[in-house]
Image (cartoon, helix red, strand yellow):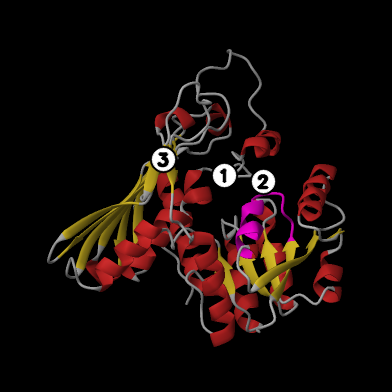
Amino acid sequence: MTRPFRCAVLSAVKHDYVARGVASHPRFVLAVVADDPHVPQWAHERNQQFAAAHGVPYVPDIGRALRDFDVQVAIVSPEAERHCDLSIRAAMAGKHVIQDKPLATRRADADALVSAVEANGVRFLMWNRDFMPAVLHARDLVASGAVGTPRAIHADFYFAKDAGPVKGTRAPGYPPIDWHAHQIAAHVDGADGSLGREPMGELACEGIYPLGYIRLLTGANVRRVFARSVAFFHQAHADNGVEDLASVTLELDGGLIGSLAIGRIGLASHPSGGAIKLHVVGTAGALVIDESRPAVGVYYKNQPAKEPRERRVASDNDFLLADDFARAIDEARDTVLGARASHAIFATVEAALASCKSGEAVNVNHLT
């Protein structure tokens, strides 16, 4: 039997589902949870709770965890602005890295992460949704030539999740919502996707998903973007100057055109977590894929308001991501969303946000 890869969970304060997803695969075992000693008490408490739930030690010393626990993999999910720091430290220690999204909040950090991964010959995976059943079906259809050569692609990615008070419901003169404190509190019900001190809108936080789909289906880099954004639904976004709704037009390699619409549209807006669809137009046909399928509807009397009415079934996304990562290590190849591909998505989001501010089309600054 192949010895499982031992994993150090480098902070579990943002999305502990990444570590849980990795641990669902028999090739991986959680060995230790770690963080820096200077993180605030609430972060230590979350880390300790996760460690206790999985029967592993919590060590407030990342260097020691990487050095003394015989680990080969680091699973990174702290606040967004700490992603690259922890991933770089793990890569420099010769550990393979699975990281939560987004890749980075600053260009210099994203560049340094790619350099660290490549210089140390380790594998990198950005956790994503590329192995959802409907997305895999779309990939196979496009690869089989069912629509001919793709010419245009569009992704709708609307998350039906709340983010605090609805825009316009707070009394005049009320102090603006503190982003960091709001995201810490939102952890209770899983609405803390943009956890960090720096306010982060939906393009930066969730843009990896639709852009990852587009990259998976086309294999093309985005070269230029034009984007528009607004804080339409949520007061926290409006108070902190970040978007909860955006549209982006994309010019890709080979004359391919694309677009995406993205937003956090509120829990009551959709019965299954959000409207997430892919549209591909090719020289021989077109297809529309609903990312939420297959699903089953569950409706009953006195159903709790926050319980999803439609529930996804037959999805092995977490297992398949972990399996792809294990195979990438075994075969010394790239993962489904490696460091350079993740950087390309970061650069596309960076350009889109610049376009939102300038009102002009912006070229995407890719690594050379």
Left or right: 20 with respect to 160? Answer: right
At 45% from the left and 55% from the top, the residue drawn is 209
Query: Where does residue 113 sit, x and y in percent of width and height?
Result: 62, 70
Q: Is 20 covered by the magenta stretch?
A: yes
Nearer to us of marks 3 and 2 is 3
At 54% from the left and 61% from the top, the residue drawn is 318
Distance between mark 3 and mark 2 Cα atoms: 24 Å
Query: Where does residue 282 sit, x and y in percent of width and height?
Result: 17, 64
Q: Disc 1 marks which residue?
A: 200
Query: Mark 1 packing: few (<14 Cα in 10 Å), some, or many (20+)?
Result: many
Query: Magenta stretch?
Result: 10-22
Asked if marks 1 and 3 touch (Cβ < 8 Å), the reply is: no
Q: Is 244 covered by the magenta stretch?
A: no
Callout 2: helix, strand or loop? Answer: loop
Left or right: 3 with respect to 153? Answer: right
Query: Where does residue 342 sit, x and y in percent of width and height?
Result: 51, 66
Callout 1: helix, strand or loop? Answer: loop
Q: With respect to residue 289, does 144 lie above or below?
A: below
Mark linked to residue 324: none
Q: Residue extending furthest front?
A: 301
The front one of 244 and 286 is 286
At 72% from the left and 53% from the top, the residue drawn is 12
Amino acid type for the residue under numbered disc 2: Gly
Q: Disc 2 marks which residue?
A: 196
Q: With respect to residue 50, does 28 lie above or below?
A: below
